[in-house]
Amino acid sequence: MAGGTSTPRTRVRRLPKRGGYDRAAIDPILDEALIAHLGFTVDGQPFVIPTLHARVGDVVYVHGSAASRTLKHLAQGFPACLTVTLVDGVVLARSIFNHSMNYRSVVLLGQAEPVTEQQEKLEALVAFSEKILPGRWDEVREPTAKELKATSILRLPITEASAKVRTGPPGDDEPDYTIPVWAGVIPLALVQGTPVPDPKLTFDLPAPRWDRLPKRVK
């Protein structure tokens, strides 16, 4: 695991005490988040696209169709910004001004590199599969050569990034602590509902066991 990732571009300026640049702060947030948002500019027009992502060591992979305009554009070396956010709670204060959220977020800057070697492509797809549901790769059909060719994968090195985290109760102004209104944190969490089988499922099979799911969605 690499060390710090602080640069002038990633340094947290607003409430800098919430910022973190060590991989020990950044990697767990990237790993827990199920969706990333990928930002880039085409001919002066900004775009922000939601996408699946998976971290393997010192890189974050994103993937999509080989025909994807987003991936084709980024594969040319244009600057990219990948962000993830986990919301942990609504922070209710005694004044509207001091309401907030408890959250964990990461901003990752860099240039994406196309993955062309077949073995690395497979390893990246395994990482996507295992992130969605550990053990799933070994249960299902692997991609064919045609499917691999139709899939584009980019790697984004984790060399310039920052984490920003808020935890704890509201921070009210001292005079406001006498206002008779409830204040505190309403915790939020991503939870899994009851699995719904595919209508075309013809085998009498149990749904994936919940204890196999990543801790983030329990």
Image (cartoon, helix red, strand yellow):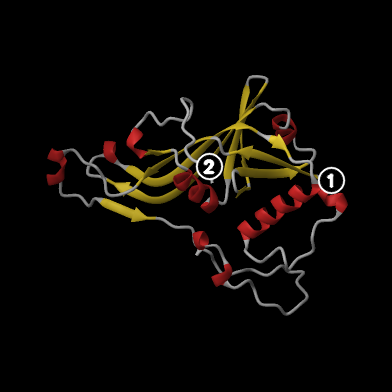
Which residue of the protein is positioned furthest toward the bottom in this rendering?
204
* Comes first in the chain, label 2 or label 1: 2
**Residue 98, percent across and down?**
27, 39
Q: Residues within 10 Å of mark 1 (few under 14, many from 20)?
A: some
Horizontally, residue 167 falls left or right of residue 213, namely left
Residue that badge 1 annotates: 149
Horizontally, residue 62 falls left or right of residue 26, namely right
**Does 128 appear above or below 6?**
below
**Residue 121, percent across and down?**
75, 48
Q: Which mark is residue 2?
A: 2
The residue at 26%/45% (across/down) is: 170
**Residue 138, percent across and down?**
72, 67
The residue at 38%/28% (across/down) is: 13
Among the 4 quarters of the image, the one containing residue 174? top left
What is the secondary structure assignment of the residue under circle 1? helix
The residue at 36%/49% (across/down) is: 90
What is the secondary structure assignment of the residue under circle 2? loop
How many dots with numbers? Answer: 2
Q: Nearer the viewer, residue 91 or 23?
A: 23
